[in-house]
Image (cartoon, rainbow, N blue to C red):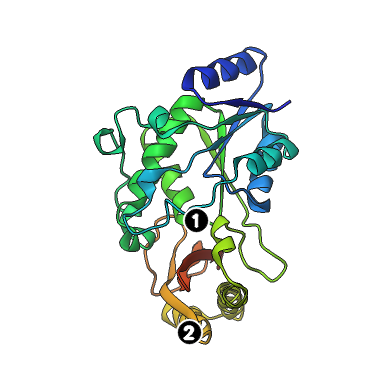
Amino acid sequence: MLETATSIPAVRAAVAAARAEGRVIGFVPTMGALHEGHVRLMEHCRDRSGFTVASIFVNPTQFGPSEDFDRYPRALEDDLDKCREAGVDLVFTPSRAEVYPRGESASTFVEVPVLSRVLEGVVRPTHFRGVATVVLSLLNIVRPDLAVFGRKDYQQQLLIRRMVEDLHLGVEIETAPTVREADGLAMSSRNRYLDPDQRRAATVLFRALEAARRLVGDGERDADRIRQILRSTIESEKTARLEYAAVADAETLEELGEVAPGRAVVALLAARFGTTRLIDNARLTE
């Protein structure tokens, strides 16, 4: 049976009881507006743990002043149904005051240098400080054995891995594959902002990534050539506004000049369709 909790003591009591029974604690943090991609994350966590906790919290500190915090979709009852179907044991739905008891502006924050200042960090300069802070707070509240994140937010999961390692948190971080629609569009809570024409146009992100993968598969090693394929594919869709197309080291996000054999390389994209901003990525080598 699905339990819900709104307070930190209630979460800790439920987790302590499960741990006393010898159960492995798994955790999936979310901002709600759940879709099939989230369900897969929760199912993955359920399969790897004996007690699965999910959080639903729209975190204000990861939104910039002109971003969509106020209109970010919120659908708690539907979210709870999806958690129940995925086999989640406990859902934590805190208030802003529960997470930030002194208010967001007066709270302690954590920042991961280097990784937070490239790609998404250039476009959204305060975003990853908010992400790292809330994830650290949630990990300290739940104290899981493992936590699961999605690969669609590639830079985010990399940054969280770095934070967990640097701060010796002792939590295993797992990354689950991106879940896509039948036409390749990566599932995202923000997809619901798209009108039908924008929804059709947004599939260009996946087409660009597939073109880059084919190019590398055919032996292309020039990273600039691969970036050009990414850019030209997206720019062929007239309604898309490209923000970046990167070919980078899969662990450091350092932009590369060459896709060298034996090096893990990832392509990362961000583009706007109308007012909706979407990101996507794909590993070009393993």
Q: Is residue 207 left or right of residue 256?
A: right
Q: Mark 1 highlights which residue?
A: 154
For the residue marked with disc 2, what is the amino acid? Glu
Q: Is residue 168 visible?
A: no
Rendering quarter of residue 202:
bottom right
Amino acid type of disc 1? Tyr
Residue at 45 percent across and 83 percent down: it is 228
Examine the rendering and report whether any part of residue 132 can be seen: yes
Residue 30, image x and y in percent?
A: 54, 43
Q: In terms of depth relative to the viewer, which is nearer, 66 or 14?
A: 66
Nearer to us of marks 1 and 2 is 2
Quarter of image, res 152: bottom right
Q: Is residue 272 above or below residue 55?
A: below
Residue named by callout 2? 235
Task: State the residue in front, 7 or 30.
Answer: 7
Mark 2, other Cα within 10 Å: few <14 / some 14–19 / many ≥20: some
- Locate residue 46, reporting x and y percent: 69, 35
| Residue at the (59%, 79%) spot, across then down | 211
Q: Position of residue 8 (x, y in %)?
A: 47, 22
Q: CA distance from mark 1 to mark 2?
A: 23 Å
- In-front residue for pair 217/54: 54
- Give the SS element for disc 2: helix
Nearest the eye: 205 or 199: 199
Element type at mark 1: helix
Give the residue drawn at x 68%, y 52%: 36
The N terminus sits in image quarter: top right
